[in-house]
Amino acid sequence: MGFYVQNNTPNVIWVAVGHYDPDCSPTTYVKEGWYRIVPGRRSLIVTGTAANQRFYIYGYDNFNNIWGGNFNTYVPSTVFTMCWVERCQGAGCRRVGFNEVIVGNSQNYTLTLTNRAQGTAKSRNTMVSRKGAAKFKLGRLSIKKSPGKLGKLGRVIRPLRSK
């Protein structure tokens, strides 16, 4: 059981996720990153049931494609786990916009990230990339290990359109 991200692009994607954590306050959400997802693979990002949960996702590749939205927070360029309202320090810290994903009653949920050029049908499980203004470079110790085995396939996300 859990929240998965599927990479349906030809490029490696780096993903950060926000999810419920009662130990964080006043906002009970934690943000974690960076998960490296290779082309054609699906990674378990958050363990436990995905049913009736809200997840926040931000992703990018090295070709200026970004998957995100309007829920802004600060993230570092290295591996991190911090409460949503915490702000990172240093040169690698940057403000990014996460996309909200509301899961129905599915125990497993897969969000699929695709490129605009792939032209797949719109789905609430698919997020399409958009072109970003600048590349976000990760440091040497930037890969966060996925927390377990894979489950059933589910939802897809495409990157957002360029402005």
Image (spheres, grey):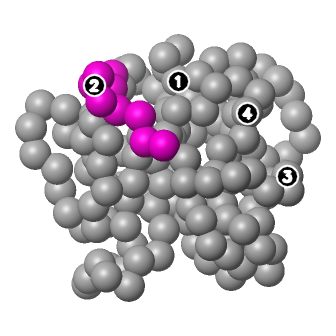
Whichever of callouts 1 and 2 sits on the residue coming sooner in the sequence is 1
> Mark 3 = which residue?
153
Whether residue 7 is visible: yes
Report the front residue among 21 and 104: 21
Please, what secondary structure does the residue beneath circle 2 have?
A: loop
Answer with mark 3 or mark 2, whichever residue precedes in sequence.
2
Q: Secondary structure at mark 4?
A: loop
How far is disc 4 from disc 3 in space, using C-alphas? 11 Å
Answer with mark 1 or mark 4, whichever residue precedes in sequence: 4
The amino acid sitting under disc 2 is Gly
Q: Which mark is residue 139?
A: 2
Image quadrant for the N terminus?
A: bottom right
The reply to whether the magenta stretch includes residue 70 is no
Residue 102 occupies quadrant: bottom right
Kindly state the secondary structure of the residue where label 1 is placed: loop
Question: Which residue, given by chain and number where applicable, does mark 1 sit on?
Answer: 61
Instruction: Please give the range of residues in magenta.
Output: 137-145
The amino acid beneath tag 3 is Leu
Q: Which mark is residue 28?
A: none
Instruction: Please indicate whether residue 89 sits to the left or right of residue 141 in the image.
Output: left
Q: Let me know if residue 139 is in the magenta part.
A: yes
- Helix, strand or loop at mark 3: loop
Q: Position of residue 130 (x, y in %)?
A: 59, 30
